[in-house]
Image (cartoon, grey):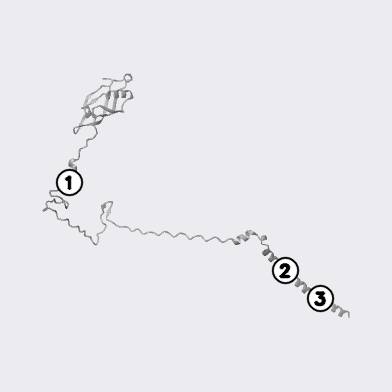
Amino acid sequence: MEAMMFQDSLFESGGRLKTKRVWTTLLSVVMQAFLIGIMILIPLIYTEALPKQQLLTFLVAPSPPPPPPPPAPAVQAVKVVQTDIENGRLRTPDRIPQKVAMIKEEEAPPPVSNMGGVVGGVPGGIPGGQMGGVLGGILSSSSMTAPKIAPQRVRLSQGVTEGNLLNKVTPLYPDIAKRARIQGTVVLQAVISKQGTIENLRVMSGHPMLTQSALDAVRQWRYRPYLLNGEPVEVETQITVNFNLAS
């Protein structure tokens, strides 16, 4: 009897436990679904709580692709023209051409001889014209009437100018040069004017103690005017002055 009562109590308690466990499981599932729904809805309602840096990275558009490289420039073919002229001269061909071009020259007009003209003249001339036509007449007339222009200055040697020397002044030997036993030659560059006077006198070489005495003396020299084609011209020459202690 007691065994039957214990068995009934086990069945009754097992049924109750089984019913209570089902309700607990259902309640747990409902609560978990509610919490999951809340966790999903909160970020959608309160967008301020989301990280802005991640949102910006999602919203930035991707960078455009790089432009294609420019096309390579087209290479122009250079056509080499072969010629037989090299540096202004006709070069020797390296092979014999198969065809030789014949150059046909135009025939010259017949000379005018029976109409009072001159052979080689131009049409429309006058009888008794000159050979070469208008250009030849101009050249010949200009060559006959061209005036001769005489040079303004000529360069002569010292030997030639000494033949035209009229007045020669001997330079004074400086006392300081005598005491120092200095002697030698002074070379001067001079221009003799059309009147025979000395102009543009300058020292080319010589001792400094002797040059001033040479300049003072040569400035007083007078020459006969040098004539070229009957006209006096200036003469450029050198003058040498010697200083000798023995003299």
Horizontal side of 121 relative to 39 (left or right) equals: left
Amino acid of disc 3: Arg
Going from N to C along the chain, the mark reached first, 3 or 1, is 3
Compared to residue 33, the image places residue 116 above or below, namely above
Disc 3 residue crowd, few under 14, some 14–19, many 20+, Cα 10 Å = few
- Contact between marks 3 and 1 (CB within 8 A): the answer is no
Picture residue at 70% right of the left edge, 68% below the top? 37
- Foreground mark, 2 or 3? 2
Q: CA distance from mark 1 to mark 2?
A: 129 Å
Residue tagged by mark 2?
A: 34
Residue tagged by mark 1?
A: 137
Amino acid of disc 2: Phe
Compared to residue 228, the image places residue 184 above or below, namely above
- Foreground mark, 1 or 2? 1
Disc 2 residue crowd, few under 14, some 14–19, many 20+, Cα 10 Å = few
Determine whether the residue tagged by mark 1 lies in a helix, strand or loop.
Answer: helix
Picture residue at 24% right of the left edge, 25% below the top? 222
Determine whether the residue tagged by mark 2 lies in a helix, strand or loop.
Answer: helix
Horizontal side of 31 relative to 51 (left or right) equals: right
Determine whether the residue tagged by mark 3 lies in a helix, strand or loop.
Answer: helix
Residue tagged by mark 3?
A: 16
Q: CA distance from mark 2 to mark 3?
A: 27 Å
Picture residue at 87% right of the left edge, 79% below the top? 5
| Quadrant into which the N terminus falls | bottom right
Task: Give the percent coordinates (x, y) of residue 209.
Answer: 33, 23
Compared to residue 117, the image places residue 12 above or below, namely below
Compared to residue 10, the image places residue 151 above or below, namely above
